[in-house]
Image (cartoon, rainbow, N blue to C red):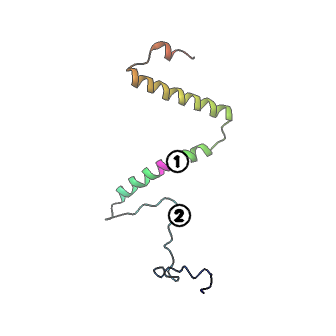
Amino acid sequence: MPRNNKFNNFNSNKRWDSKPKEQPKGLTVEVRNNDVTKALRIFKKKVQEAGIIQEVRERTEYIKPSEKRAKAKAAGRKRWLKKMEKLEGAVAPSVKRRRK
């Protein structure tokens, strides 16, 4: 009867002495064929998608919670007006002047 230990289910395809490749931390871009400009464009796109620049700008100064709410509300209203304009072709003037 075999002993029940951690070596019973040993996968012979896997070598114990091989170490997994270490992935570099953070955002990385590989430069191919000395095309630095393309790599830079790809890097900028990755940074933009990750929201790193926006986070740095937000951390530069303290913003009061009331100011955050006001900005969020204004941004939401702007998105809503843009959506209405896209749906109707033009936003009705009464909707634009609703709030002063």
Above or below residue 80? Residue 42 is below
In this view, 27 is above or below 63: below
Residue 50 inside the magenta-drawn segment: yes
Amino acid at the residue labelled 2: Lys
Residue highlighted by disc 1: 53
Q: Judging from the image, what secondary structure is the residue with disc 1 in?
A: helix
70 displayed left or right of 23: right
Task: Please tell me which residue is depicted at 49% across the width and 26% down the height of the picture.
Answer: 80
Q: Which span is picked out in magenta?
A: 47-51
Quick check: 54 above or below 8? Answer: above
The dot on residue 86 is: none
- Give the quadrant of the C terminus: top right
Q: Position of residue 56 (x, y in %)?
A: 57, 48
Front-most of 59 and 51?
51
Q: Is residue 48 magenta?
A: yes
Residue to which mark 2 is pinned: 25
Q: Which of the pair 6/51 is nearer the observer? A: 6
Nearer the observer, 18 or 70: 18
Q: Is residue 28 above or below residue 89?
A: below
Q: Is residue 40 left or right of residue 55?
A: left
Residue at 40% x, 63% y: name it: 30
Secondary structure at badge 2 equals loop
**Crowd around label 1: few <14 · some 14–19 · many ≥20 (10 Å):** few
Magenta stretch: helix, strand or loop mostly: helix
- Indicate the quadrant where residue 8 lies: bottom right
Q: Around disc 2, counting alpha carbons within 10 Å, would you say few (fewer than 14), some (14 to 19), or many (20 or more)?
A: few
- State the image coordinates of residue 55 (x, y, percent, origin top left): 57, 46
